[in-house]
Amino acid sequence: MAVVHVMALVADEVGVLRRICGVYESRRYRVRSLTAGPSGHPGVLRVNLALDEPPERARRLAAQLARLIDVISVDVAEAGRAVGRELALVKVVLPGPGRRPEVLQVAQVFRARVVDVAPRSVVLELTGDAGKVDAFIRLVEEFGAVEVVRTGVAAVRRGERVLPGAALNRAREAGEPGVPAPAAAAGAGTAQAAPGPALEAWAATAGAGTAPSGPVAPAGAARATG
C-alpha cells in the first residue's frame, strides 16, 4: 500500500504530540512514522504523519486532528502528490579494516556521506525516500553488524499549493511581487485541506506580518477529547 502523508501545523504547546498520538492510536490508524520540527514560525511546529492507510482513512484522520485546539491547519497528500524524504544514520561494524573500501563503494553508489570513521566501524549519513534507505541498509548488512537511526519521513506537497499558514512572509514583507499574503494562502486549499480551529487567529496574526508567539486558538474554543 502506498504511503499517504498527513501534514499539520500545530501550536508548540506542552502535550500537543501526546494529543495527536491519542487521536490516531484510539482509532487504530497504521502510522509508519511521525516527525515534528520547527516550521519557521515562532511557536509553531510542523508535524508529518506517514500512514499505511487508504486516502479516505487519511482524510478522516485529518478531519479528526483539525478539531484539536492546538492544530492550525491540516492537509492530506497521496504518495504521488508529495515529496517525502528521511535521513538515516547507519553505523556498520566491520569484521576487519579490509572491508571498509567495499562499504565506502556502496555508500558512493547511494550518495551516502561518511560522518565518522573508526578502526572497526564507519558511520554513514543517507537521505532519500524509504525505499532507498531500506535498500541501502540491506546491502551494508552483508558487511557486518549494523546500527540504524532513522528520522522518519518529512514531506511537502508537489506544486504551488502550500499547507495553509506554512508559507514564510519575508518576501511579501520585502515588497516582492507575486507573493500572496498568508491569509489568502490559508483560504486557497481544496477539499483535502482541513483548517483547524486555530486557523482564524493564525491568519489574523500572520496577515499583520507577525507569527503567533503563544496559543493560537480562538478564545472559548473547546479542546477535543479524542
Image: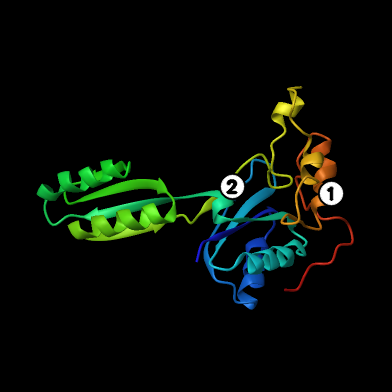
Q: Which residue was labeled with disc 2? A: 156
In the rendered image, the vertical position of residue 169 relative to residue 85, given as above or below: above
Indicate which label's residue lies in the foreground, 2 or 1.
2
Q: Quadrant of residue 194?
A: bottom right
Residue 188 screen position, x and y as percent = 78, 45
| Secondary structure found at label 1 | helix
Is residue 225 visible in the rendered image? The answer is yes
93 lies left or right of 8: left
User: Can the viewer see residue 11 in this picture?
Assistant: no
Q: Amino acid at mark 1?
A: Ala
10 to the left or right of 25: right
In the displayed structure, would residue 34 be above or below residue 9? below
76 lies left or right of 222 = left
Q: Nearer the viewer, residue 21 or 196?
A: 196
What is the x, y in percent for residue 66?
75, 61
Q: Which residue is mark 1?
A: 201
Q: Residue at x 75, y 73 (%)?
A: 225
Please state if 208 lies on the left or on the right of 166 as rendered. Answer: right
Residue positioned most to the right: 220
